[in-house]
Amino acid sequence: MIKVLSEDTIQKIAAGEVVERPASVVKELVENSIDAGSTNIVVEINNGGKSYIKVSDNGHGIDKDDIELAFKRHATSKIESFEDLYKIYSMGFRGEALASIVSVSRLTMRTKTEKDVVGTMVKYDNNKLISTESVGMNTGTIIEIFDIFNYLPARKKFLASDITEANKITNLMYSFAIGHPEISFTYIKDNREMFRTIAEDSKKSNYETLFGRDFVKNSIELDIKSDNYKIDGTISNNKFYKGNRSMQFIYVNGRYIENEQIVEAIENAYNNLIPAGRFPLFDIKIEVSPDLIDINIHPNKQKIKFSFSEQLFDLLNKKITELLYLSDENKNISLKEKDNKVRFYELNHGDGYKNILDIFKNDSQPKTDDSKVVDKDNTTSDATNSPIIDFREIDDKLSDEKINCVKNENKPYIVNDTTYDFENLKQEEVSDLNEKNDKEQIKFIDEKLIFKTILFNKYILFENNSEKKLVFVDIVRANERILFDREMKKENIVSQKLLEPIIINLTKKELDIFEQNKESFESIGYEIDLFSNNAIIIRQVPYFLDKPGDKTYFLELFDEISNKNSDKTKEYLLRKTLSLSINKNTNLSEIESETLYKELLKTTNPNTSPHGNPIIFNIDYDVFMRLLK
């Protein structure tokens, strides 16, 4: 039977599109404050915004006669017709925010216009107006939200932890403060001031507050004009970067947006200037005529369609590339050199299974005039009479050949055949490894392996005569897996005391991340304390750190955990610390190589490193022999 939904049910369903989580409430309220002409906005939250949100501003306020109307669905002062969407500069326009918020929470609003003698306070509970009264206040609006989703328990249980929800709001507040330097913002979390920007302060001062001093020291100003776009902002140079994209901000006509193509255009300009897996910081502000964009795509209004989009992407990439290569650090590198280096980097620094292919493609010895190679260490070797193999022709010769790598399916640690195509060099899917540590099921053939050599200072090469295979073991990844398993079993990890404590300046956001995860840092061997309002002091570090005084380790750790689930923080920290500090010594003896392999087999997951990269590779004898023909 078809039934017409009640108005209350319709309201709550509609509210779900606008109010997804506490950060959605903050977003809608702050955008309303901006549209009201505010020059000072204060945001306060408790418990990740779940129990309490307060947004105060000094904007125009709402006329007393319009207050109840403001809480009706699709009631707005910003547009009158659909055509107005294509000439709009305001943050909001749908007229859904307040109606959606009062449908899922308790709300108190106080507001006053300049012409009013006193303000008006209204209280709503579960979409019902409870009371209206006059109050004394300054011009502006103050909205308090209590117990979001309290009337929707099914929705409330899907909210993340307080820390995660608070981090969402923190990221949001950064986007507002960076995007609107003409407004003073104060952000208070759990009764602690996270940051304060001053509209009268210089751009540099506010950047120092939000991005940190290091960004200011390593920044480049951006000023681009074209027929359709005006772009200004600030980008980091190639000396300053992060391990995530948390400090990348793009604005269109003052609105924070997310656009992967713009990010890609900017990041491509940094190719070969910053390490792989690292990301530039930027604040990009784009001004464009409203009739050249479409913002009516999603209720959160963070997705935008552009006219002349390719022109925009090309313009950004070209201008930022020029700026980076005109900077003092890169004046001696030509754009032609950059292109060559990018190709070389992509060829030689592949990850996972591609590494083993690169051995054959790029690391073979150069061909001599007589097509022979001499073993310098052993002049009696048979290799002196062996023809050199040009492995760079491997793609043509082995377009149909396969390489086998260790993989498990239903049982742990079973050596099966996983095929990889030389032509495409693409890693095929590897099924999730079973964590059950049943040694009886292990079929690694360690007793059948014969140590041969250390190959390219990266792999241990074993020969398996019984199954006619070459077995490669990645030394660094094997070390990571062994140490990771050993240390994860410990409640606390042994520390080493630093001769000179390290003091590191952090942004407010990074300080907050540290305080959230202080216990996890301590559990893996760090002793870190607050040193000042914007700095920490590190006195002890895990015993296995090979460069304990290197500040870059710690900055990368903060990047790694900034958006991670707090339940897994210790694991993330340990994994990252190991990847940054594992002993890269690969000059192992035969006994050391065999011992490393046996220790690897004792771990919970010998097949992959803590990062999920393969450790053991097999190449069938027949496949290898065909390379020699």
Image: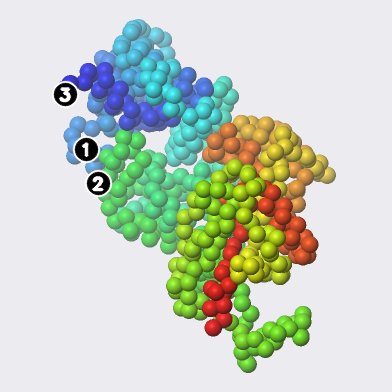
Image point (61%, 49%), residue name: 441
Q: Nearer the viewer, residue 239 or 46?
A: 46
Left or right side of 259 for 292: left
Q: Quadrant of residue 276?
A: bottom right
Secondary-structure class at tag 3: loop
Q: Amino acid at mark 1?
A: Asp
Screen quadrant of the C terminus: bottom right
Mark 2 crowdedness (10 Å alpha carbons): few <14, some 14-19, many ≥20: some
Image point (46%, 45%), residue name: 249
- Answer whether residue 488 is visible to the viewer in this image: yes
The x, y position of residue 212, in whole percent, is 59, 42
3D distance between C-alphas at marks 2 and 3:
42 Å
Screen quadrant of the N terminus: top left
Earlier sequence position, callout 3 versus callout 1 = 3
| Residue at the farthest bottom position | 370
Residue at which label 1 appears? 84
Residue at which label 3 appears? 2
Residue at which label 2 appears? 291
3D distance between C-alphas at marks 1 and 2:
10 Å
